[in-house]
Image (tube, helix red, strand yellow):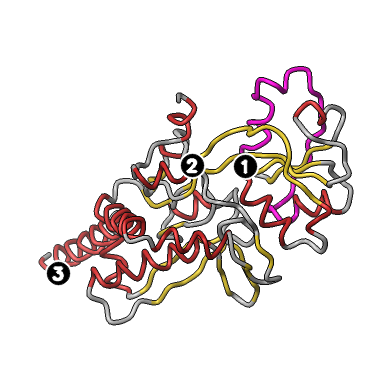
Amino acid sequence: MKKHLLAVAVTALAAGSAFAQATDTLAKIKASGSVTLGVRESSGLSYTLGNGKYVGFHTEMGEIVLADIQKQLGLPKLEVKYQPVTSQNRIPLVTNGTVDLECGSTTNNAARQKDVAFAVTTYVEEVRIATKANSGIASIKDLNGKTVATTTGTTSVQTLRKHERAGGIDFKEVFGKDHADSFLMVETGRADAFVMDGSILAANISKSKNPADYKIVGEVLNVEPIACMLRKDDPAFKKAVDDSIKRQIKDGSLAKLYDKWFMQPVPPTNTKIGLPLSEATKEAWANPNDKPMEDYAKK
């Protein structure tokens, strides 16, 4: 009987420990000596150079956050594992514990806040339209009768349809499996335009064979706060992530990082994306917060 009770107690303790670690990412990181960073393969803020190498403004910022957490935990070494995520699987991979911190290009909105938590906003995105320079498309009204590409699992075309100037506009929608695939549809003539975050459009244009053949046009369709994503109900980990980001803002290193990835030539083609820091992003840095997109719409 005593052995049975002991076994039950050990099992309960193990289960309790596993549950605690599931909601205590810092304890999980300290115990394992490793952490998994969620990254993107073809986003404007996070992308791959191939061979398991991931770069970009948000990727490097996330690496700095994890280096600060390593110091906080007093770990002599921290193994950072990179897990590529897509628009469809990024939230499940965070909630099921596969990814500890996702620093891709995820919009903080009220619906997603029901499932995950967000760090303070680090980039405020403007949704725009990319098209070939000779397409004749200059605004929403010019999309009438056209084919518009967007990426599966994103909100951009819903945003376009809801825009006040989209009334009476009829266009066909096609879906790319990722951002590179969506842009390829425009490159190959299968779509007339690609509706997506401006940074993603600019990055894909900069990496194309002939960047001058494409342009970003039209009205700003939406303003969206982009932030790193983490599990809900883990205040200690969220504080550690937020504290690192706030430090990077305060000491100017985040601004230098932005300049590196958006105003200087970047790999793989050493092309400059050329997206100056927006007033909306400056405001988010001046007043760090984790407000969802819906709060921006109220302004």
Residue marked by disc 3:
3
List x then y, in percent, for residue 195.
71, 40
- Look at the numbered disc 1 and give the secondary structure of its residue: loop
List x then y, in percent, for residue 21.
28, 60
Residue marked by disc 2:
279
- Residue drawn at the location 38% of the way across and 45% of the way down: 117
Residue marked by disc 1:
154
Give amino acid for label 3: Lys
- Residue drawn at the location 35% of the way across and 45% of the way down: 286
Give amino acid for label 2: Glu
Q: Indicate whether residue 116 is drawn in magenta.
A: no
At label 2, counting other C-alpha atoms closer than 10 Å, the crowd grade (few under 14, some 14-19, many 20 or more) is few
Instruction: Please tell me in which quadrant of the rendered image residue 15 appears.
Output: bottom left
- The vertical placement of 14 against 121, above or below, is below
Give the mark nearer the N terminus: 3 vs 1.
3
Tell me the magenta residue range: 155-181
In the drawing, does residue 195 fall left or right of residue 254? right
Instruction: Please tell me in which quadrant of the rendered image residue 218 appears.
Output: top right
- The vertical placement of 268 against 292, above or below, is below
At label 1, counting other C-alpha atoms closer than 10 Å, the crowd grade (few under 14, some 14-19, many 20 or more) is some
